[in-house]
Image (spheres, helix red, strand yellow):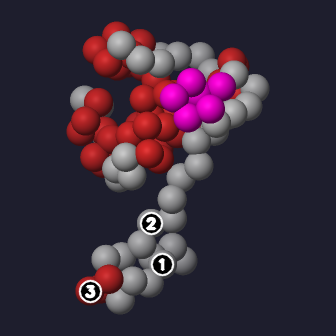
Amino acid sequence: MLIAESGKAVGERVAQVRKTRLMREVESRFGQAIDVLLYRLYIKDNLTMREVAQTIGVRSDSTVWLWLLKFGIPTRRWMLPEEAGGQDCRR
């Protein structure tokens, strides 16, 4: 399956993702497939997971993270802001 807006293939996993009621509600509100919407907001518009969650009206950035994984959309590494040293916080 292809993400229509970007032409980026996300693979066979998209066809296998069982959409939740919340995913279908978001699709209905935005009139766009959830994988296309997530790709546009997170990759093209460069929003954070928290900003994506607020934009689409879900309660948690964890929900967005899980959806990105399910649809095979690559996630960015979490970094501290520059003034805090810019070090990778994962241990």
Amino acid on which the number 3 mark rests in the picture = Glu
Res 3 visible: yes
Q: Are marks 2 and 1 in contact (CB under 8 Å)?
A: yes
Res 4 → quadrant: top right
Query: If the image is split into quadrants, where does the N terminus sit?
Result: top right
Label 1, on which residue?
88
Amino acid on which the number 2 mark rests in the picture = Trp
Query: If the image is split into quadrants, where does the C terminus sit?
Result: bottom right
Where residue 72 sits in the image (x, y, percent)? 63, 39
Q: Going from the N terminus, do you reach mark 3 or mark 2 first?
A: 2
Q: Is residue 40 magenta?
A: no
Q: Which of 18 and 81 is in front in this view?
A: 81
Label 3, on which residue?
83
Q: Relative to 17, say whether 88 is above or below.
A: below
Q: Relative to residue 41, is residue 66 drawn left or right?
A: right
Q: Relative to residue 73, is residue 39 drawn left or right?
A: left
Label 2, on which residue?
78
Q: Going from the N terminus, do you reach mark 2 or mark 1 first?
A: 2
